[in-house]
Amino acid sequence: MYKSVLVATDGSETAGQAVRVAIELAKLCGAKLHVANVYRTGEGAIMRAPGLTMGLPEGIDAGSVAATRAESVVAHARTLGVKAKANVAGGDPVEQIVAIAAEQKADLIIVGNKGMRGLKRVLGSVPNGVAHKAPCAVLIVNTT
Amino acid sequence: MLEAMTDQLPQIRHQPTGSGSLCRTILRALPTWFGIEQDRLEQDRPEQDRPAAQSAPLQSVRRRPGRLDMYKSLLVATDGSETAAEAVRVATELAVVLGARLHIANVYSSSNPAPVYAGEMTMAYLESLERGKFATAETEALAERARAMGLSAQPHVVAGNVAERIVEIAEEQHVELIVVGNKGMRGLKRVLGSVPNAVAHSAKCAVLIVNTT
C-alpha cells in the first residue's frame, strides 16, 4: 500500500526501533526504503550516542559518521530483501527529513517518538516537527 | 552487514576520551541501532557453526510468515468527516496487510458547555443523544464494511474529549497502533493543537498520521 517509505535515524536506540518497523513494513508493502540520516552542522554539531553527549573528536566529521550509519542500515535492509537507499544530509533534522521525503516522493515517513512526551514536548521535538510539516503520512513508532 | 558494523567500531574506539564506558555503551546499543535481533545475528554465522538440522537453505528455515509480528491490533479514529474516511480506508487496508484486529472509535462531543436556560440545556442534551445514535449507526456500518473484507472489527462509540477518549480506548483494548487523519496538523490550527497532535503526544503506542488534506 505504501510504495516509498522513509525512515529517519540518528543512530540512537529509539531510531533503531523505527528502523526495525520500517524494514518490516517496507517488506510487507514491497516498498522501497529510504534511510535518512541527518547530522547537525555548524559550531554546535555534536555526536549523539545513547546516554551521552560529546563533541566530535578531531579528524572525524559528522557527515561521514552519518553516512556510515545510514549505509549499515541500508546493508541490513538489503540482506532482508528490501530495496534500500541511504540519504545523508546536514542541517536541521526536521527540514531535511521533510525535504528528503519530498525529493524521494516518499508516501510514508517513519520516526521514533523520542521527545514526544514529557518536558521536551513543549520544546518541540523532531517527530513533532515532522508530523506537522510532512507532505505525506507519518508513523510515530513508540520506542520509549 | 557485520563488516559495515565493525568498520564503524575503530572510529568510535579511538576517541580520545579513553573511557571504557563509552565503548561499552556503544557496543551494547549496536544491535538495536541497526534493528538487529539476536536471531538475525544467528543467520550471519558460518554454515558449519549451525546445527545440522538447519543446514537447509536459509530462506526456508528462517522465513517469517509474511506478516509483521507487531501491530496486531489497530485503532482508527473517525468523526464521520471526509478526512476521517480516508484514515479509515488506510487503517482497513493496513489491517488486511498486517492481519490485525481493527477497532473503530467514534468520539462525539457530549453536550456543549452548560447553557444558562433550562430549556436549552435539555435541547443540548437531546442533541447529544441524537449525535450518539447517529455516531453509533455510522460506526457500526464502518465495522460491518471491514468485516465484509474478512477483518475482525469492533466499533466503539463514546462521548467526551476526542483525544483523551481515543487514547483511553486504545489502552483498554491493548491497541498497538492508532491511525488518525491529519486534520488541523498544518497551517494555522497547528498552534491551537488538534486531535492528531494531542493523540500523537499522549498515546502510549505507535501513531500513524494519515495525510488527508
Image (cartoon, coloured by chain):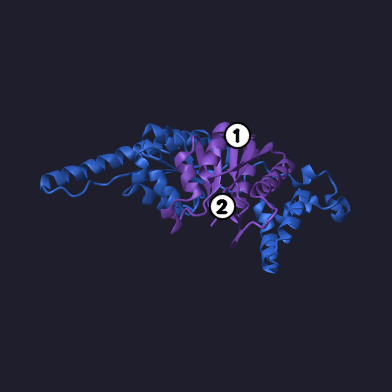
Element under disc 2? loop
Are callouts 1 and 2 both on one chain? yes
**Which callout, 1 or 2, points to the residue nearer the camera?**
2
Dividing the picture into quadrants, the one containing residue A108 is: top right
Q: Could you tell me residue B39's position as x and y percent?
A: 73, 54
Q: Colour of chain B?
A: blue
Q: Name the residue under label 1.
A: A4
Residue B76 in picture, x, y percent from top left? 45, 42
* Quadrant of the rendering where the N terminus of chain A is positioned: top right
Confirm whether residue B205 shows in the render: yes
Q: Residue drawn 52% across and 33% down? A: B149
Question: Residue B153 in the image: x percent, y percent?
Answer: 48, 41
Q: Which residue does the image show at 43% across and 59% down from the upper left?
A: A119
Q: In which quarter of the image is residue B143?
A: top left
**Residue picked out by circle 2:** A43
B72 shown above or below A134: below
Going by the numbered disc 1, the residue's amino acid type is: Ser
Q: Which of B138 and A44 is in front in this view?
A: A44
Tell me if A102 is positioned left or right of B189 in this view. Answer: right
